[in-house]
């Protein structure tokens, strides 16, 4: 299985528009982060997790020619706003499958109501097939995907385990029962927003505690804000098996 980190930044991305913060002004390409998303590829299949406002550029940058579907963690704008840009895929492939919790699907139907219009459909509007995810394993082609439920302040969000790869973002609390599903996974991705605590995201310390509990072979941090610091400095401070993800990073699991 091949994983490509399409974006590793928090909701505003890095740099933040108009910011003079040193991390926002950094020339290190690893300090430039689009909104979070990963490409997951196995056999002949390609899925994207989340579809934020940078989706179009992420697809161009990674050279993605077709997708088999999009899986959503939750409905915040930094995870769904790029959906209109599925049009090139729709024009070539037809209906695009979307997988999400029923509340997330409801939000997508409200925000992109023209996808679902039955009358007076605008000819360029894409069509999608929605698949509801509950907190139990579901199939993407020949692969069983296991959802991991967590809380993002008071909002329920899903992470996903694809074989030996677990991808969780926008988590603030995850129960021990849910952690059991990903214990000793080979590769774990988890959000780490910044150094100081935050009401709806793990900070660095909480992310490292979470990694201890899960005990993966390797862990990558994502959904990073400028307040975490410079990529190079933060990575040097991390425990041995923990790395900062960066945009364009590819791993094989
Ligand atoms: Zn987010
Ligand atoms: Zn969020």
Image (cartoon, rainbow, N blue to C red):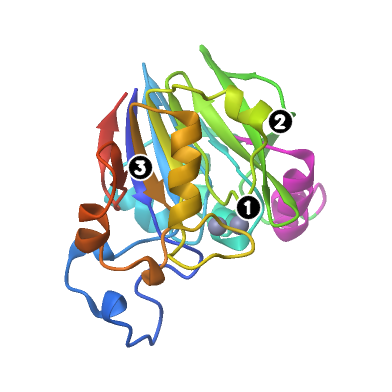
Magenta residues, as a range? 97-119
- Looking at this view, is 252 or 204 the one in front? 204
Q: Give above or below for 138 relative to 195.
A: above
Q: Give above or below for 132 relative to 239.
A: above
**How far is disc 1 from disc 3 in space, using C-alphas?**
37 Å
Is residue 100 among what the camera can see?
A: yes
Query: Is residue 71 located in the magenta-colored stretch of the structure?
Result: no
- Looking at this view, is 12 or 244 the one in front? 244
Q: Are marks 1 and 3 in contact (CB under 8 Å)?
A: no
Q: Main secondary structure of the magenta part?
A: helix
- Dividing the image into 4 quarters, which one contains the C terminus? top left
Single out the mark in the foreground, 1 or 3: 3
Q: Residue at horizontal 57%, vertical 52%?
A: 170
| Label 1 crowd (10 A; few <14 / some 14-19 / many >=20) | some
Q: Give above or below for 1 relative to 73.
A: above
Report which residue position mark 2 lands on: 133
Return the x and y of residue 218 as percentages of the image width and height.
32, 32
Report which residue position mark 3 lands on: 220
Q: Secondary structure at mark 2?
A: loop
Q: Give above or below for 224 relative to 142.
A: below
Return the x and y of residue 101 as percentages of the image width and height.
73, 38
Return the x and y of residue 41 as percentages of the image width and height.
38, 27
Is residue 92 among what the camera can see?
A: no
Residue behind label 3 places its C-beta within 8 angstroms of ligand 1: no
Q: Are marks 2 and 3 in contact (CB under 8 Å)?
A: no
| Label 3 crowd (10 A; few <14 / some 14-19 / many >=20) | some
Instruction: Tell me the quadrant of ligand 2.
Output: bottom right
- Looking at this view, is 87 or 69 the one in front? 69
- Residue 84, by quadrant, is bottom right
- Residue at the extreme top: 142
Q: Residue at horizontal 50%, vertical 41%?
A: 210
| Label 2 crowd (10 A; few <14 / some 14-19 / many >=20) | many
């Amino acid at each position: 299985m091949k994983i490509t980190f399409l974006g590793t930044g928090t909701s505003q991305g890095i740099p933040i528009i108009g910011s003079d913060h040193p991390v926002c002004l950094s020339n290190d390409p690893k300090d430039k982060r689009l909104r979070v998303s990963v490409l997951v590829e196995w056999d002949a299949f390609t899925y994207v997790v989340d579809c934020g406002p940078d989706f179009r550029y992420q697809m161009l940058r990674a050279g993605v020619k077709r997708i088999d579907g999009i899986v959503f963690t939750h409905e915040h704008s930094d995870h769904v706003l790029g959906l209109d840009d599925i049009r090139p895929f729709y024009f070539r492939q037809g209906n695009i499958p979307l997988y999400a919790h029923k509340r997330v699907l409801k939000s997508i139907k409200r925000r992109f109501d023209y996808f679902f219009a039955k009358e007076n459909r605008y000819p360029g509007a894409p069509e999608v097939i929605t698949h509801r995810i509950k907190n139990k394993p579901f199939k993407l082609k020949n692969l069983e995907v296991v959802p991991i439920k967590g809380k993002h302040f008071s909002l329920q969000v899903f992470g996903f385990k694809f074989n030996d790869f677990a991808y969780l973002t926008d988590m603030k609390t995850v129960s021990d029962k849910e952690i059991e599903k990903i214990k000793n996974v080979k590769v774990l991705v988890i959000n780490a927003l910044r150094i100081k605590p935050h009401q709806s995201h793990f900070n660095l310390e909480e992310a490292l505690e979470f990694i201890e509990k899960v005990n993966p072979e390797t862990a990558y941090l994502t959904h990073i804000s400028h307040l975490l610091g410079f990529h190079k400095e933060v990575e040097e401070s991390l425990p041995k098996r923990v790395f900062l993800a960066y945009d364009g990073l590819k791993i094989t699991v």
